[in-house]
Image: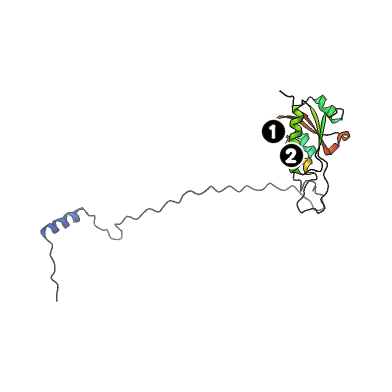
Amino acid sequence: MSRRRRTLTPEERALWDSVARKADPIRKGRSSVPQPAPAAKPPGPAKPRSEAPPPLPPFRVGSKVDHSRDHDLMASLTEQMARTPVQMHRNDAARLKRGKRQPEARIDLHGMTLAEAHPALMRFITGAHAKGLRLVLVITGKGKDRDEPGPIPRRLGALRHQVPQWLRMAPLAALVLDVMPANQRHGGDGALYVTLRRGR
């Protein structure tokens, strides 16, 4: 059974004509549907410029190489003290280096662990400052070799190298004027002269 073809009503025809007049004709070879613009990529982090490594020093086969500082993890105590200018008068510093001044009090941290030595040092320094003392001696010991040396090089004497750091940190830094290695008569490399500031 054939279906009868439906014709447009006058209203439908008028509507179709108005739409057809406003529509743009499709050109051959060009799509009338606008294509979405490609999404812009978000800016990524700037790549750091690769700097050229510093040039190696000249080397000749058979020449000697200085390996003394290849594994130097931290400056020695003497080097640290030498870099820090003293605050006291230089005549007093010279007398102190020669061992001509006598410490007014001393504390022996030798044999203590770091956890034991830190609070003991804080009590000693704050107490000496409260009493108005000016020069005290802190004995750290020189340190000893470990029974089983590990693969990572480490300086001898944990206290010997840690105590000067504690003396430069709060709250002790506000009480300490100078720290210097002791003269041989007072312990040498295993002790420190600590000059305290005057009380206010």
Q: Quadrant of the N terminus?
A: bottom left
Q: Is residue 85 visible?
A: no
Q: For this rendering, which residue is in front, 18 or 195? A: 195
Q: Which residue is mark 2?
A: 118
Name the spot of residue 60 as percent of width and height, x first: 79, 51
Q: Amino acid at mark 2?
A: His
Query: Which residue is painted at 80% across and 25% down in the image?
Result: 90
Q: For this rendering, which residue is in front, 191 or 56? A: 191
Indicate left or right for 129 with 52 as reference: right
Mark 1 vs 2, N-terminal side: 2
Name the spot of residue 162 as percent of width and height, x first: 75, 40
Name the spot of residue 28 as percent of width and height, x first: 28, 60
In this figure, which colouring scheme has been used for the structure? rainbow
Q: Amino acid at mark 1?
A: Pro
Q: Which residue is mark 1?
A: 171
Indicate left or right for 130 with 6 as reference: right
Q: Residue furthest bottom?
A: 1
The relative height of residue 147 versus residue 187 in the rendered view (above or below) is below
Q: Quadrant of the C terminus?
A: top right
User: Residue 16: which quarter of the image?
Assistant: bottom left
Q: Is residue 115 visible?
A: yes
